[in-house]
Image (cartoon, rainbow, N blue to C red):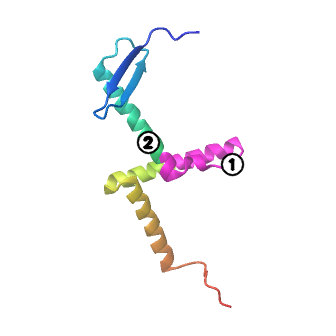
Amino acid sequence: MGYGFVKVFRTIATNGDAEHWTSSNLNMTELERVATAEKTWAIENYHRGLKQFCGVEKCQARSATAQRNHIAMALRAFLRLETYSYTTGYSWFEAKMQIIRDAIRHYLLSPRYNLVSTA
């Protein structure tokens, strides 16, 4: 049970922290490793946004169909958030807050429910 040969890269940050990157591509250069690291960072950033702003991990459904539906709707919400963020120049946080503020403002113009007690 082995993995064969691997190539290990060691980078040391200015604060002295060391990171190790391992690849099964023995011909990988440092430049290719940096490009791959940038791609993995973009993927991590995407996952963070999907979890933080669209609640993809908060599904409490038990059936597989309901879980898939939840994930699909979270992905759709994230794509809409990303599109809105891209077109307006807002960050994800600012974009989400802007959408929420607009929804509240719209609701307050003609509320359906009265939460004030009349007694």
Quick one: SS at disc 2? helix
Q: Is residue 63 magenta?
A: yes
Mark 1 lies on residue: 61
Residue 20 vs residue 60: left or right? left
Residue lying farthest bottom?
119
Mark 2 lies on residue: 46
Image quarter in which the N terminus is found: top right
Residue 31 vs residue 119: left or right? left
**Residue that appears at 44% across and 52% down:** 80
**Residue that appears at 69% across and 48% down:** 61
Return the x and y of residue 56 as percentages of the image width and height.
56, 47
Q: Amino acid at mark 1?
A: Ala
- Is 92 above or below relative to 71? below
Quick one: SS at disc 1? loop
Most common SS among magenta residues: helix
Q: Quadrant of residue 30?
A: top left
N-terminal of the two: label 1 or label 2? 2
Return the x and y of residue 29 as percentages of the image width and height.
30, 17
Decide: few, some or many residues near mark 1? Use Cα within 10 Å; few <14, some 14-19, many ≥20: few
| Contact, mark 1 vs mark 2 (Cβ under 8 Å) | no
Return the x and y of residue 92 as percentages of the image width and height.
40, 53
Highlighted range, magenta: 50-75
Q: Amino acid at mark 2?
A: Tyr
Image quarter in which the C terminus is found: bottom right
Q: Is residue 64 magenta?
A: yes
